[in-house]
Image (cartoon, rainbow, N blue to C red):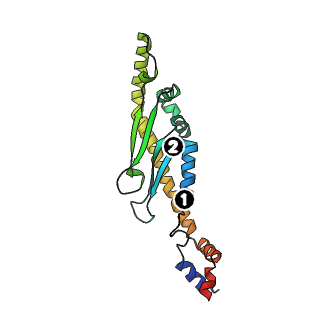
Amino acid sequence: MKAEAKKLLIDNHRYINVDNTDWYECVYASFGERLRDDVGVEVEQIYFSDFWSQGDGACFTGEVEDFLKLMTHYNLTPDFPMLSKLLEMGGRAQCRIYHRGRYYHDDSVAFNWDIDVFTDCVNTDSLFIELVVERFDTLLDAEKDRFMAEVESCLKAEMRQLYKDLQQDYDALTTDEAVWDTIVANELHLEETE
């Protein structure tokens, strides 16, 4: 096959690997597994939009399942000692990630937070314990806003990385070499030469 004919065939089938396929499923799966296993976040749904517009991007919905794992992964434990102690004592923190709006990027999500206080976790039978717990709650309260902002920033960075991974995979699937391999595997080059 002549080089010109091969190039024309490749150009005509440029999107053969990405049209009408779920080419992104591998990226989705590895992203979801990594966040679950390494970060402690359960990804429920992933959204993304193309690669050619200013507002394009990726985001996900889900829930933080393991805050201690998340804090370890992002090295947040030293910066938030009271929250770490609360979680170690069985205190509960919840964060749900919701999609909002019609676009799909890291700024199109909202976070819904609920964090216990030490008063919920500690039996305050004595006045001394009650005073200590109140002091712990005051210190914890001082950490909460910073902590929520830091976690949201980390998870939005994950969304931006997901978008980069999707774009990289898409670009790899539409290269001349990848398209030609699919053409040959499907014997389309034989049909065209006939």
Q: Residue 183, located in which quarter of the rendered image?
A: bottom right
Q: Residue 113, located in which quarter of the rendered image?
A: top left
Residue 34 higher or lower than 88, as above or below: below
Image coords of residue 188 (percent x, y): 61, 80
The mark nearer the N terminus, 2 or 1, is: 1
Nearer the observer, 30 or 167 = 30
Q: Residue drawn at (51%, 44%), measured in percent from left and top?
A: 42
Residue 169 higher or lower than 182, as above or below: above
Residue pointed to by mark 1: 25
Q: Which mark is residue 163?
A: none
Q: Residue drawn at (46%, 19%), measured in percent from left and top?
A: 122
Q: Is residue 180 left or right of residue 93?
A: right
Categorize mark 2 by other alpha carbons within 10 Å: few (<14), some (14-19), many (20+): many
Question: From this viewpoint, which residue is outermost toward the left?
Answer: 101
Label 2: state its secondary structure: strand
Image coords of residue 34 (percent x, y): 57, 48
Image coords of residue 181 (percent x, y): 63, 73
Q: Residue 97, located in which quarter of the rendered image?
A: top left
Image coords of residue 101 (percent x, y): 34, 54
Q: Is residue 163 left or right of residue 37?
A: left
From the image, which quarter does the N terminus lie in?
bottom right
Nearer the observer, 146 or 11 = 11
Answer whether residue 3 is visible to the viewer in this image.
Answer: no
From the image, which quarter does the C terminus lie in?
bottom right
Contact (CB < 8 A) between labels 2 and 1? Answer: no
Label 1: state its secondary structure: helix
Answer whether residue 41 is visible to the viewer in this image.
Answer: yes
Residue pointed to by mark 2: 41
